[in-house]
Image: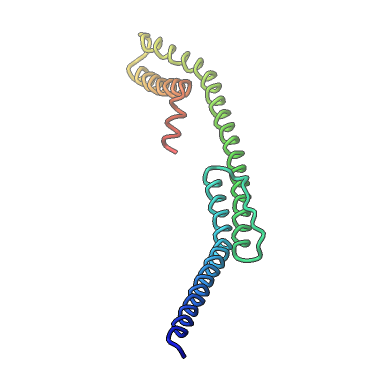
């Protein structure tokens, strides 16, 4: 065999091996991109859906209809979004009820305070008149001073309630 023929055959063989290697490399890249997109596409949908829910869009659902773990994860995600939406609806309903109860409590307290203030003011006036009277002994005047002090406490409570201070103090304590 001639050396030139051997070199030509070797060159031809190298070219064929290079073409086969490049073809196999191209085929493996195509297969790996296709295979990876099989996994990354549902992950991207899940990531997008998560960001929508994080931003408050609880009506968003993930549309992955697969029978594998990604399909199960999408179904669980959608169930979670429905559950969150229902719980937030209940919380908003409860918040409205609490606000209404607070409003009614405040109204009751103010109306009751207005009804109490007149008789309490009258009692305060009478205690002042009695203390100025000379018909009472020291023991009687001391008892009337105690009544006046208690009456002043009641007047302060009523004024605080009328001004809303009572409600603020109660909230701070609770």
Instruction: Determine whether 127 is above or below 82 in the image.
Output: above
Q: Residue at x 54, y 63 (%)?
A: 33
Q: In this view of the protein, which residue sits in the foreground, 14 or 135?
A: 14
Give left or right: position of 14 versus 45: left
Q: Residue at x 53, y 53 (%)?
A: 47
Q: In this view of the protein, which residue sits in the foreground, 143 or 104?
A: 104
Q: Residue at x 59, y 48 (%)?
A: 84
Query: How far across and down, in percent of the image, does residue 140 sit?
Result: 37, 18
Instruction: Determine whether 33 is above or below 53 in the image.
Output: below
Q: How many marks?
A: 0
What's the image's color scheme?
A: rainbow
Q: In this view of the protein, which residue sits in the foreground, 34 or 70?
A: 34
Query: How far across and down, in percent of the image, does residue 35 sit?
Result: 57, 66
Query: Farthest residue toward the bottom?
Result: 1
Q: Residue at x 60, y 36 (%)?
A: 97
Instruction: Determine whether 158 is above or below 1 in the image.
Output: above
Query: How far across and down, in percent of the image, does residue 87 sit?
Result: 60, 47
Q: In this view of the protein, which residue sits in the foreground, 10 or 125?
A: 10
Give left or right: position of 92 versus 152: right
* Residue 115 found in image quarter: top right
Query: How far across and down, in percent of the image, does residue 74 sit?
Result: 61, 57
Query: Farthest residue toward the left?
Result: 138
Quarter of the image that includes the C terminus: top left
């Amino acid at each position: 065999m001639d050396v030139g023929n051997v070199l030509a055959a070797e060159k031809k063989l190298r070219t064929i091996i290079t073409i086969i290697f490049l073809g196999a490399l191209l085929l493996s890249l195509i297969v790996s991109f296709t295979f990876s997109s099989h996994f990354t596409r549902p992950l991207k949908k899940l990531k997008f859906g998560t960001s929508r829910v994080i931003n408050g869009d609880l009506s968003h659902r993930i549309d992955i209809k697969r029978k594998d773990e990604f399909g199960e994860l999408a179904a669980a995600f959608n169930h979670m979004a429905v559950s969150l939406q229902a719980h937030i609806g209940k919380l908003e309903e409860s918040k409205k009820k609490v606000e209404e109860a607070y409003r009614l409590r405040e109204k009751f307290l103010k109306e009751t305070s207005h009804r109490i203030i007149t008789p309490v003011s009258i009692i305060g006036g009478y205690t002042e008149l009695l203390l100025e009277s000379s018909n009472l002994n020291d023991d009687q005047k001391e008892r009337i001073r105690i009544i006046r002090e208690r009456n002043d406490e009641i007047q302060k409570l009523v004024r605080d309630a009328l001004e809303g201070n009572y409600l603020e103090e109660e909230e701070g304590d609770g």
